[in-house]
Image (cartoon, rainbow, N blue to C red):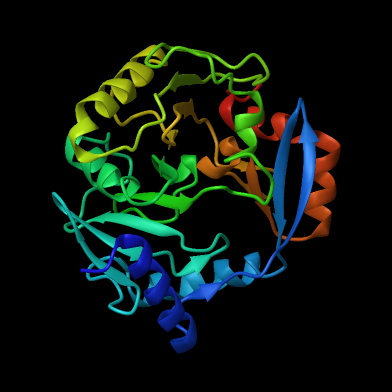
Amino acid sequence: MPSLVDRIGSTSARAALSGALVSIPTETTIVEDAGIPFIVHVSTLQRTKRRAGLATTSARSNPFLPPDPELSLGPVPPRHHAVLNKFNVLERHLLIVTRTFEPQRALLDDGDLEALAHCMAEVDGLGFYNAGVVAGASQEHKHLQLVPLPLGRGPLATPLDAIVDPSLAPGRLSRLPALPFEHTLIPLDGRQLTPNRVSELAGAYDEARRSLGILDDSRPYNLLVTRRWLLLVPRRREHWRTVSVNALGFAGSLLVGDPDELAAVRREGPLNVLRSVVEASP
């Protein structure tokens, strides 16, 4: 059977030709803040995507039951499907979706993390989870996501890696002094995340949750995982002004709808944008 990387490539090519895959064209710019080279994607089609998404939702309340066969990559053990993100900004953007409905705000269990590890064993990427609408989730059906690294064209895997000290001891709770908001980072050892490391990954996830008081599904959050670190950030709101923020924002990648929103992000500073969606309302 072809590798996951090969299947993502061939399925993406076919789906783009058929129109099943709708890539959102963007222009990117770098906005540096506290040493982090944030990648800001600017697209006037973001509003078009929202309209198309609303139309799809009204016509089909759950696009994952069943997933579009033109976007599907097959089952992922123990209980998930791999599906291409229909409206992608980043190429080869993968969704890891439960085969039966589970709520998006639910805490992740070992099966969810095993499915993520199956995919990350083959794809050196950024895995993430938007736990609920407030955390930037656009679908209520539980799904993790995975995008290949690097996120940009430079030497960094993610912009956030500019401030992650590689000498931090694996497994220890850490904070990044440059991030002016509540979060927990746990360094990992850089090895492939394979299914036989699920207990290690689950332990880091649970420890990070407990450190932030996220004990059940009542508090939204973003989870980000690479082979080198795990980051957990609690959320209080989805938007800064008109800009929606999901987990990718905390890796250093933001999406704005037009040049006016880009100018507003520049004036505010990306870290203040992120802080505004983490902190409680004044």
Q: Residue at x 32, y 21 (%)?
A: 204
Most extreme residue toward the left is 78
The image quadrant of residue 36 is: top right
Q: Residue 238: percent from the left, percent from the top? A: 55, 42
The image quadrant of residue 162 is: top right
Along the horizontal axis of the image, is 5 left or right of 101?
right
Q: Residue at x 57, y 37 (%)?
A: 251
Most extreme residue toward the bottom is 18
Of residues 2 and 126, the one nearer the viewer is 2
The image quadrant of residue 239 is: top right
Q: Residue 115: percent from the left, percent from the top? A: 24, 47
Along the horizontal axis of the image, is 49 left or right of 259?
left
Q: Is residue 238 visible?
A: yes
Q: Residue 99: percent from the left, percent from the top? A: 18, 59
Q: Residue 247: percent from the left, percent from the top? A: 51, 41
Q: Is residue 246 visible?
A: no
Q: Residue at x 63, y 45 (%)?
A: 253
